[in-house]
Amino acid sequence: MIELRNQAAIVGIGNVPFGRRGEFADRGHVRLAVEAISAACADAGITPKEVDGYSSYYSSVEPAELMAAFGVDRLRYASQTWGGGGASMCGAFQNAAMAVATDQADYVVVHKVATMESTKRYGQSFGQIGQGVSAIGGPFAFSVPYGLQSPGQMFALAVRRHMHLYGTTTEQMAHVAINARAMAANNPEARFREPLTVEGHHASPMIADPLRLLDFCMESDYGCAVVITSAGRAATLRHRPAYIAAAAVGAPFRYGNALMSFYNQPDEDFASSGHRTVAEDLYKHSGVSLADMDAAMVYDHFTGMVLMALEDFGFCPKGEGGPYAADGNLGLAGPVPVNTHGGNLAEAYTHGMTHVNEAVRQIRGQAINQIDGASNVLVVGGAGPAPTSGMILTGEQ
Amino acid sequence: MSDRLPGLPGPQPDPTTEGYWTSAGDGRLVVQRCDGCGVHRHPPTEVCYACGSLEWSWDPHGGLGTVYSYTWTDRPIVPALASLGVYNVSVVELDDTDGVVRILTQVTDVPREDLVVGLPVEVHFDPAGDGVALPMFRPRSKGERP
């Protein structure tokens, strides 16, 4: 068997300065991707013309547009993954790593951009599904006619079940948001840097009971890109490589579309972020155990889903994510600090790309909330329809 | 469009799901059942997840279940749905099936404080146009079984 472990590395990261919802609507997706890829290549010390592969997830920007825009001499690789929003995001890194490790390409860029209409919340784009038609088919026939039309409602169903099974509380969920604000306090790129209290969290309006406004992440316009190359090439470039120790996509038995339209998975996976099998694969393939982990960047679109992801990855026993967060384990003094940049809840919502950026900065020793000697960092993709995803990066080859 | 839920589309049947929706239109709850191994499944699909058989039939169901999870929607998701007011979407696990069958639905006729996980419910039907209806659930009437 060919092992992928540490055969590819992240050598460049880049993003355009984060915008508020709708701020970049006039710039267009290709422009944002081009700016982000240019920034990531500059960080790596290469030119965008040297990039001969593109990888993305749930993307609107096509490789054809990018290779034409940059005048790439010879495109050699292109792929993307399925899974709504940022669920499969680490799959784009898995594909890129496999491509450069097997000489399908020299440099693969993982890119992702989004712009939203300034007048519409992100959830409203889901809410438009089924509007203006008398009947809706496909999987949505079993959810949209009942008014299930937003990510907040979908994840509220998992959170409610988790509360029922394990006694998880909204106060415990608040600690995920509180941690994000604390981490973002000295991050100049972060949008929400003011401290938050449990009382402040509880004062925010109920949106999708049991989820309050401050259980939801913000919405951002963004463009992000990451350069990946083989371990051999990485050694010749300017930064300490962040080797991809493992990247995986997957989902457990009967997970399916999960909260979008399918509800038959066993209890332990219904009240979960869907990462149980991904976690098993990552630990097995990386050779990195949780005891070796220096930090974790966990996709935080909803506070409750962070608790469940920590359970799926073994930070605490199943069902104890709430007490784990409330006891202060997410902070810089905790065993594995979580979202040291502020994450989706406090910095910006980039469908997971900035979680990768922060993992790379920790390994390079360039993070704002730098963890001394950080080498192994877990990245967790979003809870969402199959496949979900994750990745372990390491500074030691 | 359902009578109860103005602004939302009704279900569009396809060859696999048509029997489910039209039975509901006739006031009957049916669940897809594998002809090979007898396992029930929902939403309808072409193949049995347990044994792989492509053969299946509609099995009448008594319409009793319990609330598995729920969420209350306190704000309209899009302005056109403001007339729905505050509503719940709920997952109901059906009683007496071979294999887990959970249905996304709404629980009607229930005060907010009374909707809890484990609440026993019974099916009723909300006409949704063109001979189809949405299976909905409400707290079971005392001493009665549908």
Image (cartoon, rainbow, N blue to C red):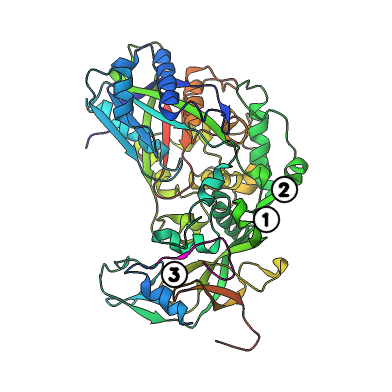
Please check the rendered image and state whether residue B8 is part of the magenta-colored stretch, yes or no.
yes
For the residue labelled by badge 2, is the local secondary structure a helix, a strand or a loop? loop
Residue A196, horizontal then vertical, whole percent: 73, 35
State the mark number for residue A205: 2
Q: Quadrant of residue A343?
A: top right
Q: Using the image, determine if residue A230 lies above or below residue A287.
A: above
The chain holding disc 2 is: A
Q: Using the image, determine if residue A241 lies above or below residue A87.
A: above
Q: Nearer the viewer, residue A375 or A257?
A: A257
From the image, tell me which residue sits under label 1: B74
- Do the residues at pointers 1 and 2 share their chain? no
From the image, tell me which residue sits under label 3: B100
Q: Which residue type does callout 3 highlight?
A: Val
Q: Which residues are magenta?
A: B1-12
The chain holding disc 1 is: B
Q: CA distance from mark 1 to mark 2?
A: 9 Å
